[in-house]
């Protein structure tokens, strides 16, 4: 690599003007990089702000089209749907996940009628639907992998039939991508994509998300028997390789900013569409500082998202999607 020597080479020369900085910028953030996660509830009426995620809401089906409209107008390519399931519809098996009339199936149909041009991403996991808060079926306190995979494949198929374009298994069960791909292909749904949460860590940054879904209080113990240890990096590469072999079209790393090294290694090793989730805890930290006027949102939101692009991300799930899309349009 050529570096040169001072004073013949002055690195600051290319930083001296705004137009020059634009010319030599190595990475750019655009609206095409954004996926907006939203929370959908059964209750009608005014959307309910999530206390631990200021600026984010639980929205009912009656306000869903109105809520999503600005994202469509701003040109955001896709939204990710997450269900807020009432307690009386939760059970040990997560049965509501395979109800063809559940909240996400209804939401997908409604959104596809209103906005056929926007991509819909459907989360596949049982934690919003189980009374114990785990992503699979518990047997003697341990999540049973194979029984869970069976119901996850059924859930994925229902979501695809309802209009979900991208199935996003976030459960971290072994073999679930192959089972889902097989279930979809058997129904000739060959164009339904799979965005695998391939490297999902057992992180402390998920707290506000679980509060938003109402699954945190019921969680009896942690998810370390199936989600990844934050100490491990090589294991993440093995997980990604297996999911790609099983038929994943895209892979995701979650959380985001604490795992930029994993994103970079995944993109460098596999050169496949690679996504990251800037999770609820990351959002809550930034919003806390922004609301206390310790940080400037016009600078730090874009800066935090550009870090994902430098690491190699093709797209980012972020609760800041609307904010940054508006900012990019104004700029």
Image (cartoon, rainbow, N blue to C red):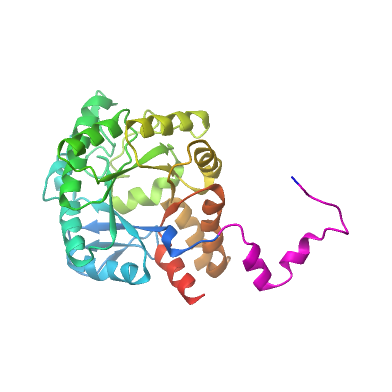
Q: Nearer the viewer, residue 243 or 295?
A: 243
Q: Quadrant of residue 135?
A: top left
Q: Is residue 19 magenta?
A: yes
Q: Going by the image, does 309 lie left or right of 96?
A: right
Q: Position of residue 222 (x, y in %)?
A: 37, 34
Residue 91 image point, x, y percent? 17, 39
Q: Position of residue 137 (x, y in %)?
A: 23, 31
Q: Residue furthest bottom?
A: 330
In the rendering, at what x and y percent does residue 112 appear? 20, 61
Q: Residue at x 48, y 37 (%)?
A: 270
Decide whether residue 105 is among the magenta residues.
no
Residue occupying the far top of the picture: 140
Q: Is residue 30 above or below residue 170?
A: below
Relative vertical location of residue 13 with respect to residue 100 in this rendering, above or below: below
Q: Quadrant of residue 134?
A: top left
Q: Is residue 8 left or right of residue 257?
A: right
Quadrant containing the N terminus is top right
**Which one is in front, 103 or 129?**
103
Q: Is residue 222 visible?
A: no
């Amino acid at each position: 690599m050529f570096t040169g020597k001072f004073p013949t080479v002055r690195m600051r020369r290319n930083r001296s003007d705004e137009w020059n900085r634009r010319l030599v910028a190595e990475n750019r953030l655009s609206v095409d990089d954004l996926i907006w996660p939203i929370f959908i509830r059964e209750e009608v009426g005014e959307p309910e702000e999530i206390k631990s995620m200021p600026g984010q809401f639980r929205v009912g089906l009656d306000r869903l089209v109105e809520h999503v409209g600005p994202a469509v107008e701003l040109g955001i390519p896709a939204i990710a749907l997450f269900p807020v399931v009432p307690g009386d519809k939760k059970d040990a098996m997560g049965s509501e996940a395979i109800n063809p009339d559940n909240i996400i199936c209804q939401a997908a149909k409604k959104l596809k009628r209103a906005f056929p041009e926007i991509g819909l991403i459907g989360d596949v996991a049982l934690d919003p639907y189980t009374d114990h808060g785990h992503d699979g079926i518990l047997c003697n306190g341990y999540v049973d992998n194979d029984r869970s995979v069976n119901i996850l494949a059924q859930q994925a198929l229902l979501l695809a039939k309802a209009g979900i374009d991208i199935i996003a298994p976030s459960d971290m069960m072994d073999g679930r991508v192959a089972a889902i791909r097989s279930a979809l292909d058997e129904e000739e749904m060959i164009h339904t994509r799979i965005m695998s949460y391939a490297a999902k860590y057992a992180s402390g940054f998920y707290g506000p998300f679980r509060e938003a879904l109402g699954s945190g209080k019921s969680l009896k113990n942690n998810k370390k028997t199936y989600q990844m240890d934050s100490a491990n990096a090589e294991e993440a590469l093995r997980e990604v390789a297996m999911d790609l072999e099983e038929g994943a079209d895209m892979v995701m790393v979650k959380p985001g900013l604490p795992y930029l090294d994993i994103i970079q290694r995944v993109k460098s090793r596999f050169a496949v569409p690679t996504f990251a989730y800037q999770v609820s805890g990351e959002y809550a930290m930034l919003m806390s500082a922004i609301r206390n006027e310790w940080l400037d949102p016009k600078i730090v939101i874009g800066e935090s998202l550009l870090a994902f692009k430098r690491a190699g991300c093709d797209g980012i799930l972020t609760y800041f999607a609307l904010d940054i899309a508006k900012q990019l349009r104004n700029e």
